[in-house]
Image (cartoon, grey):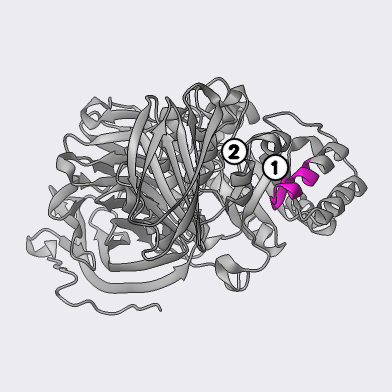
Amino acid sequence: MYCMKRISFFLIVSSLLFNQCGSPVSVTIVSPDEQVSFQLFEKNKQLHFNASYTGKIVIADSPVVFLLDGEELTNEVNGKTSKTYAINEQYYTRGVHRDAVNHCNGINVNFRSAKTKTAFTVEARAYNDGVAFRILVPGGKNAVRTPDEASIFKLPEGSILWYHDLRGHYEGKHVRREISQVTENEWAATPITFRLPDGIGYACITEAALFNYAGMSFQADGQNGLVTRLGHAQPISSPFLHDYSQEEAERFAIAAEITGNITTPWRAVIITPDLNTLVNSDLVSNLAPAPDPALFPKGVDTEWIVPGRSVWCWLDGGVRTPEGMKEFSRIAGELSFEYNVVDAFWYRWTDEQIKDLVDYSAEQGVKVWLWRHGRDVRDPVARKALFERCNRLGVVGLKLDAFSHESKEFIDLYQSCLREAAEHKLMLNIHGSNKPTGEIRTWPHELTREGIYGLEKRNQIWAQHNTTLPFTRFVVGAGDYTPVMFSARRGETTWVHQVATAVVFSSSLMIYGANPESILKNPMVDIIKTLPAEWDETVVLPCSEIGEIAAFARRKGDLWYLGILNGEKAKTLQIPLTFLKGGERYYAHIVSDDPAASDAIKRNEEFCSNTDTFTAQMSDAGGYVVRFTKQ
């Protein structure tokens, strides 16, 4: 159900005082549960905003800075009118849980710049788990203008941040800093998670509904503020320079023009009391447009969109020939996996060889994806030919790689690829990418995207990183980390830790990094065979702590899994099984670390119910995995 209506005084407080009369503009909007509030106001002639939760500051008074053709619109404004609305709907989603709730109070406030006379609107929403705002500037269909932004998000003193820089685009390891330690001009990619002072809870700053616009990151001001920076202002990353020219880098450093109406992406702040509600937040997808019913008549349940698990020949050996990939598909079938993602080495194969692999894989119950470089889909004619070829040969999805920039041109390329792939009924996995901004809702055939520092990186220390990702990057959407390795690439982590990542990390196309033969031979293969790629329910256990412990209970149908990722130091945790359904009996298949060796496991089996408590003993960089089968 979708509802837009005037909102009662108890749900939203909206007072717009015309500054022509000498009074500053001030608008306050509150969430349906009245715990979250967003205020838009004028201070020293500059538009500002703030956000609070249970009366405590989440974003302190912060300037809204929006420029058009180099002229700032949000300084010296004349307030005109405002209109409130409400949204209350539910829809099916995918990944962390099945049912999404989109419930908020919203407002549109119309302004006119006193300097340029340009009319614009600030739209804001308050949800029970956060706030968001965006700016809309009307224009004729032939109007060509250049927007830019420098709004600041000022964090409360004492906030603890987890963020990474832009050297690897969106593939970076998070650091933990108190906000006062974040130095001036330091770069931070979104999403940025921070713990609020005084035990208030957690927040995460990001953007949603990114299209026809450049992507957003932040640069610190050294005064507890994060300054908005669009794609043209961001530093060029090493992945971009690896795949593209310096000349293109210089071209993308120029702010992009937009023709017609200008609508910024939503500037969103997820606000929650704990990590469970943070991980389960639907705020980003709620802010994104609903899917086009002509392309996706059943939304995420459209028939040709099928989440699943895949083998992959890249990180852990394998014969990179058509016959070698047939063997991968054969083992994928034995593992009950749905897919085989064939990487770049297929380029010189003939159509007959590809079709032969597709047909053989189908006999194993496995379907085929192909990798392609982003350069190869920039030309519309070449892109159409590729998509049509995949259709003709029976390929079901494409892994498109090496975008590596948030310029408007690359954001437009994302959208073109997504729309045209949907028209050809092809699923997508986008690599060398930015962060998700709600594609899970608008483009449900995008099963995953990279934009994450994953196991493709060599010789790394993983435990702290892996226990940070579930509460940072994974908060905003699926990530193709390519988890589960049993070879040296797993670094200091244990075998059980590796399998637990497949429980804790979210990706509707879960591509396992290990050679499928090594998966088949591993003593945890029986667990791996039954692990789903999407979940009906997720519960983050209270023992979780960013960078230390990520403990997730997840349900698919009647089957529950408990996956715990441990950080650097060995721990023993008491885990109440209260997430299990009351009054039911479960058979628990328990896998834990063997303290004697990181490449060995211990097994245990027992019956239990939701009144029981398990003891999870984990080694340094260890893990704990339990499968609960209802009896």
Q: Is residue 498 above or below residue 310?
A: above
In the displayed structure image, the side of residue 12 where residue 163 appears, left or right: right
In the displayed structure image, the side of residue 104 where residue 262 appears, left or right: right
Residue 165 position in % (x across, y down): 41, 29
Residue that badge 1 annotates? 311
Q: Say which residue appears at 26% left-offset and 48% top-offset.
A: 64
Q: Are marks 1 and 2 in contact (CB under 8 Å)?
A: no
Amino acid carrying label 1: it is Val
Q: Is residue 146 magenta?
A: no
Residue 364 position in % (x across, y down): 80, 53
Extreme left residue here? 22
Q: Residues within 10 Å of mark 1 (few under 14, many from 20)?
A: many
> Which of 206/487 is in front?
487
Identify the disc placed on residue 188.
none
Q: Is residue 213 above or below residue 346?
A: below
Residue that badge 2 annotates? 482
- The span picked out in magenta is 328-340
Q: Say which residue appears at 25% left-offset and 72% top-offset.
A: 84
Extreme front residue here? 606
Quarter occupied by the N terminus: bottom left
Residue 173 visible to the viewer: no
Q: Is residue 161 above or below residue 149?
A: above
> Which of 44/333 is in front?
333
Q: Is residue 337 above or below residue 619?
A: below
Q: Residues within 10 Å of mark 2 (few under 14, many from 20)?
A: many
Residue 49 position in % (x across, y down): 21, 52
Residue 500 position in % (x across, y down): 50, 40
Look at the numbered disc 1 and give the secondary structure of its residue. strand
Amino acid carrying label 2: it is Thr
